[in-house]
Amino acid sequence: MRVVSGIQPTGNLHLGNYLGAIRNWVRMQDAMPAGDQCLFFLADMHAISMPHDPAELRRATLEMAAALTACGIDPARSILFNQAQVPAHAELQWLLNGTARMGWLNRMTQWKDKAGKNREGASIALFAYPVLQAADVLLYQATHVPVGDDQKQHLELARDIAQKFNTDFGETFTLPEPIIPPAAARIMSLRDGTAKMSKSDPSDMSRINLVDDAELVMQKVKKAKTDPEPLPSEPGGLAGRAEALNLVTIYAALSDTTPEAVLAEHGGQGFGAFKPKLGELLIETLRPISTRFSELLGDQEALDAILARGAAKARELAAPTLEATYTALGLVR
Ligand code: ADP
């Protein structure tokens, strides 16, 4: 089994990123059978498909590497790297551009959504983005790729490209199977239970950042918007109470249980009693993460070393497939 998964580098990481994305990776890594490996990459090469700030991309890439490591991705067990240090991704993309069809890419809903009405002004990278994604997984002969709903179509495309290439030029690529990750918690703003917790919310009180200290976490939880009603004893009683539901969801996600179980235990309590317990749970969970995260952010050398080591392993794994692809296409090396 070989699992390959990528994530766009994003800065100002918060509880939503941790519970909604990063924690799933850590669990995938921990569930891998002995001898099998996960490859986790930071999709920095994808990030240039949209207008971006180079200094910000650099910062976000390092921050994401630090966060993943702090949250439990173990560079000794998994291969953690950024695409830009493994040129084989870009090379294979070019080689696959001969196989991918305009019609296939034109049908991608993400392309249609992101380009909007301004297709003429969109970058070629945005259009060809799914071919780079195909290269990302085919390069390592991935057997399994975790995909959310929004990425299913891109994985299908990767399989179509692999299949056509294998038919036209000989058996070269493994067709990757999707794995549907366990439903991740969707964490909402602490100020508005109907809006996603997000780094772009202008109010810092709306989110718990991975760098927040214990005091600030408790303060944010205590000031979180709620209603005057006590907690119900069953989830049905949270209907129409988005903020209350959000706090219960966070509590359940952190303690690895269900909202039902949280309410069975805490139903009947007012928020004056429940919030400090939630605050404590958050502080306990985040303490080791934020400590390690801050250490790594201040240690450029350690971060560079983690990424360099991952990239070296990735280049080694990628080399035979890249070579086979050149050869299959009749390119003289
Ligand atoms: P933001 O919304 O803060 O800009 P990103 O879009 O950069 O976050 O998200 C990076 C990853 O974190 C994505 O995989 C996304 O699904 C996850 N994520 C972001 N916010 C949340 C949230 N509030 N709840 C659950 N997952 C989230």
Image (cartoon, helix red, strand yellow):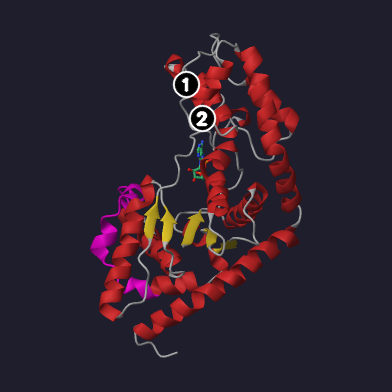
Against 10, residue 240 (above or below) is above
Please indicate whether residue 276 sits to the left or right of residue 229 in the image: right
Please indicate whether residue 17 sits to the left or right of residue 237 in the image: right
The magenta region covers: 95-118
Relative image position of residue 176 (x, y in whole percent)? 38, 62
Task: Between residue 142 and residue 137, name the one nearer to us.
Answer: 142
SS assignment at label 2:
loop
* Residue 188, disc: 2
Q: Amino acid at mark 2?
A: Met
Q: Is mark 1 within 8 Å of ligand 1?
A: no
Q: Which residue is mark 1?
A: 242
Report the magenta stretch's main SS: helix
Against 207, residue 47 (above or below) is below
Q: Amino acid at mark 1?
A: Ala
Marks 2 and 1 close (CB-CB < 8 Å): yes
- Image quadrant holding the C terminus, namely bottom left
Can residue 303 be seen here? The reply is yes
Can residue 48 be seen here? The reply is no
Is 113 covered by the magenta stretch? yes
Q: At x 37% / y 72%, what residue is drawn?
A: 173
Q: At x 62% / y 28%, what residue is drawn?
A: 205
Against 182, residue 73 (above or below) is below
Calculate the distance from the C-alpha at mark 2 to the C-alpha at mark 1: 9 Å
SS assignment at label 1:
helix
* Residue 231, disc: none
Relative image position of residue 92 (x, y in whole percent)? 42, 73
Task: Between residue 198 and residue 168, name the one nearer to us.
Answer: 168
Tally the marks.
2
Quadrant for residue 286, please give it: top right
